[in-house]
Amino acid sequence: MSKYTAPAKVNLHLAITDVNNDGYHGLDTSFVFVDVGDTLDISLADELTLSCSDTSLNGKKNLVYQVLSAFAIKHNIDQGLHIEINKKLPSQAGLGGGSSDAATALMVANKLWQVGCSQDELIAFAVPFGADIPCFIYGEVSLAKGIGEQLSPFPHHIPTETIVLAWPGMGVSTAAAFAHFDENYFHALTDESSAAKVRARSDDESFVLGYNDLEQSAIILCSPLEDMLSAMRKQSVRAWMSGSGSACVALCHSFTEAQSLVDDLTSKALASWVHIGHFMPEHPLKEKIGA
């Protein structure tokens, strides 16, 4: 059995550009990896079995199981895998934990089962299972459009400061965050013409590090988020919410500043999960298994 990393991601910005007829949202966003994540122990087996340190995510209810089961059926694989997931990332945090687990497992299965799918083929297969999965398969800091599957290299500076990730102990449902945005904010940001709905923020002139259309909706849905994010903004270079929330990231001048922020967040019970680290421009498995 070998261990494989499933890193967290942070959105460097997130703009909603449209709501499609099928209910999916058009996005202009960007992804970078973080040096913290879940760990997957994976080995070849006769059948597909999965256990998780969070027992509520054992077996067939886990996204990893669902993705690999469908992948095996699609490619007529009669072999299984034994998978043990050690969860470190909180759920409903906007850090892509479940999607990252699924992407890592899919890339490993592609190798162990000797399917030989290309990166583009894996991304196309994964899209129906979750809009965040493709960025992990892409394997490097990226811009994303469409529903998150249209990926390209990130053209801007990647922050190199020490970062603090923090989660307030309460999650935000992605579906609920988008629904609240649609009902309360989307109309104020657009007019009747479809062209005016496109508010791309990834171009050189309008890119704003940390901009997130879903922030206000997430704060309303998750009351502890506002106090945590406010404290992070007062004690860092810049702080913002990732994805649909509720985890936030702060850029700090030094490890000492980061530790001081963490101490404040934990002593005041503003965060129940924290991490001090750095952004990573590439997926840690990019060279090992061709992410």
Image (cartoon, grey):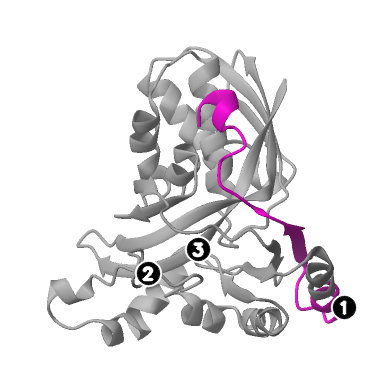
Q: In this picture, is 234 found above or below 94?
A: below
Residue at the spot of label 1: 267
Q: Which residues are magenta?
A: 263-291
Alpha carbon distance from label 2 to label 3: 10 Å
Alpha carbon distance from label 2 to label 1: 33 Å
- Whole-percent x and y of residue 191? 18, 83
- Whole-percent x and y of residue 47? 58, 18
Residue type beneath disc 1: Ser
Residue 108 lies in quadrant: top right
For marks 1 and 3, the one nearer the N-term is 3
Closer to the observer: label 1 or label 3?
A: 3
Alpha carbon distance from label 1 to label 3: 28 Å
Residue type beneath disc 3: Leu
User: Residue 12's mark?
Assistant: 3
Left or right side of 162 for 192:
left
Can residue 136 be seen in the rendering of this structure?
A: yes
SS for callout 3: strand
Q: Does the residue at mark 2 contact the one at mark 3 (Cβ under 8 Å)? A: no
In the image, farthest residue toward the left:
193
Residue at the spot of label 2: 15
- Whole-percent x and y of residue 267? 87, 78
The residue under the point 36% across, 34% down is: 125
